[in-house]
Amino acid sequence: MNIRVEDILRHNRLSITGSRKKILSLFLSHAGALAHGDIEKKAGEKFDRVTIYRTLQAFVEKGILHTIPTSDNNVRYALCNDECYEGHHHDDHVHFMCRLCGTTTCINDAYIPEVKLPRGYNALQVEVVVHGICKNCKK
Amino acid sequence: MNIRVEDILRHNRLSITGSRKKILSLFLSHAGALAHGDIEKKAGEKFDRVTIYRTLQAFVEKGILHTIPTSDNNVRYALCNDECYEGHHHDDHVHFMCRLCGTTTCINDAYIPEVKLPRGYNALQVEVVVHGICKNCKK
DNA sequence: TATGATAATGCAACAAAGTTGCAAAATATA
DNA sequence: TATATTTTGCAACTTTGTTGCATTATCATA
């Protein structure tokens, strides 16, 4: 697992440091999306808050992570899938937020349908956030 | 215009106060969505920050406004359309955020297509945020 | 329309979230 | 290994959001 983390960092021309390895492996070992606060808790007291901000920002710029829009002023971050690593940023995402357990998951295989906009509007990116009950909570 | 504002407040069993009238008329006279900060600026120094927070919260609870999810930790608020006033909250929205002028608009007449989710996921609400170039900026 | 009940506001104090500059430390490069 | 570059942690600060409470405004009704 650690080897993969270092490969990703190297591939994105980011120095291999403790905080980056830790934060990236948190995402790799955790299915759902994470907010800044989640990472602060999960990483323990080990890293400065500022470092976490800067690490997340760097990961988003490199396309390793993407953000998930929210209505609670608490943006979540999730791993991009493999296509993202190859320059072609995979911008259109479907995300699912569970009303019960609160977890956010990135549904990579959901097909995003064409959205019909009024005349004159030009779409560059479509984000879809579905709220409901997730697979685990439904059981 | 003021009459309409007071009607809406009365209809929602909210006391008619200066801040509510002001904030509601800001939305009625402004096509796009507004963030808390925008309202603070547009309302001038007239109202306490806390009052604006509580007013927005009340409007959302009553279904007068709805929130628009964002990736910048800066939730926008927009007027619900008429259906919202009748108990039946109009939950599924398409919102458009312009990359150039930054304005967010609520596209009420856009049809929200069915999103196919993996087995076991149950959708209750679908939010769509489209990023691109708006009608005005395209000219 | 005066009056008591109810609700909203503003203030203060606080908590949480996010930013910036800079010196020290870690990592990369050659 | 030595030097250049990058990243980190710290401090100080700004912005954003929250809570309790006394004061004030609005509402209901007699």
Image (cartoon, coloured by chain):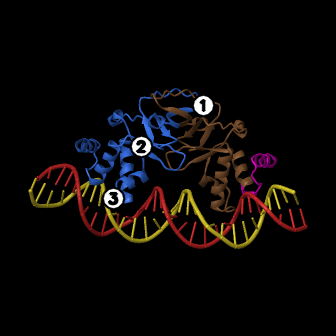
Chain colours: A brown, B blue, C yellow, D red
For the magenta stretch, what is the residue range?
Answer: A1-19
Which residue lies at the image location 54% right of the left edge and 43% below the top edge? A69
Q: Position of residue B18 (x, y in %)?
A: 27, 54
Local secondary structure at mark 3: loop
Query: Magenta segment: does it hold B111?
Result: no
Q: Magenta stretch: dominant SS?
A: helix
Which quarter of the picture shows residue A101? top right
Residue B73 location in percent, x, y? 52, 50
Would you say the residues marked 1 and 3 are in contact, meaning their CB atoms lie under 8 Å apart? no
Q: Mark 2 Cα within 10 Å, few/some/many (few <14, many 20+)? A: many
Query: Is any atom of residue A82 visible in this view?
Result: yes
Circle number at residue B33: 2
Q: Are marks 2 and 3 on the same chain?
A: yes
What's the residue type where badge 2 is placed? Ala
Q: Which chain hosts label 2?
A: B
Regarding mark 2 in the picture, which secondary structure is present there?
loop
Give the quadrant of the C terminus of chain A: top right
Amino acid type of disc 3?
Phe
Helix, strand or loop at label 1? It is: loop
Pointer 1: what residue? B120
In depth, the one of A119 and D15 nearer the eye is: A119
* Residue B47, numbered circle: 3
Residue depth check, mark 1 versus mark 3: number of the one nearer the observer: 3
User: Do marks 1 and 3 share a subunit?
Assistant: yes
Label 2 or label 1, whichever lies nearer to me, is 2
Q: Is residue A117 above or below residue A56?
A: above
Q: Would you say the residues marked 2 and 1 are in contact, meaning their CB atoms lie under 8 Å apart? A: no
Q: CA distance from mark 2 to mark 1?
A: 34 Å
Q: Is residue B104 above or below residue B18?
A: above
Classify residue B1 as left or right of residue A7. Answer: left
Q: Please tell me which residue lies in front, B30 or B125.
A: B30
Q: Residues within 10 Å of mark 1 (few under 14, many from 20)?
A: few
